[in-house]
Amino acid sequence: MYYVNHEQINVRLQFLPTLTQACAELTEQWEHKQPSEQLLLHLAQERILHLAIETVTDIGSLLIDAFMMRDASSYEDIVEVLAGERVFDEGTASVFKRLVQLRRPLAQDFATYPRESLHPLIAELPAVLRSFAEMVPAFISREMV
């Protein structure tokens, strides 16, 4: 029998709509940004991307632990393990791989991170995160029978 930390998974799943809303609001504000707002919007974008990375990988780590999957050696590996276990499809895995590759630049190279444009993942994340929020409980249900 598996021990699934439903509480921690659900807390993170319930945060996903906040991220999708933030992406939508950022996109809307980006289109109408004034030069004085540019830095603030860039920093908001970085935080949204960073929170998305942490939320997805936290959920992934909880699933890996709960279902005794192969240990992941990196953030990219978390995505690969989950895709291999069919938690989500290859399309989602592709977006998440691109997302987690941003972790180092956002967390460690933040002083030199390019702040020039809206990152393409901001537009892609809402649909992928909504799908992920459905795929995780479906995976848990399949595995618990």
Image: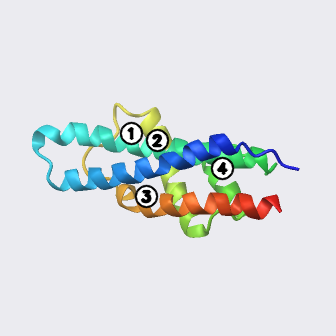
Q: Is residue 119 visible?
A: yes
Residue 23: x %, y % from top left: 35, 52
SS category of the residue bearing label 3: helix
Contact (CB < 8 A) between labels 3 and 4?
Answer: no
Residue 114 on image: x %, y % = 31, 43
**Nearer the observer, disc 3 or disc 4?**
3
Q: Which residue is mark 3?
A: 125
Q: In which quarter of the view is residue 88 placed?
A: bottom right
Q: Closer to us: mark 4 or mark 2?
A: 2
Distance (Cα) linking label 1 and label 2: 6 Å
Residue under label 4, please give it: 78
Sequence-wise, the earlier of marks 4 and 2 is 2
Decide which of tag 1 and tag 4 comes sooner along the chain.
Answer: 1
Residue shown at 52%/48% (left/top)?
14
Q: Residues within 10 Å of mark 3 (few under 14, many from 20)?
A: many
Residues at badges 2 and 3 in contact (C-beta under 8 Å)?
no
Image marks 1 and 2: residues in contact by CB distance under 8 Å: yes
Residue receiving disc 1: 47
The residue labelled by disc 2 is 51
Side (left or right) of 56 relative to 120:
right
Q: Residue at x 79, y 60 (%)?
A: 143
Label 2 CA crowd tier, 10 Å (few <14, some 14–19, many 20+): some
Q: Amino acid at mark 3?
A: Leu
Q: Nearer the viewer, mark 1 or mark 4?
A: 1
The vertical placement of 70 against 113, above or below, is below
The residue tagged with tag 2: helix, strand or loop?
A: helix
Q: Percent position (x, y) of residue 103? A: 49, 42
N-terminal label among 3 and 1:
1
Amino acid residing under circle 1:
Arg
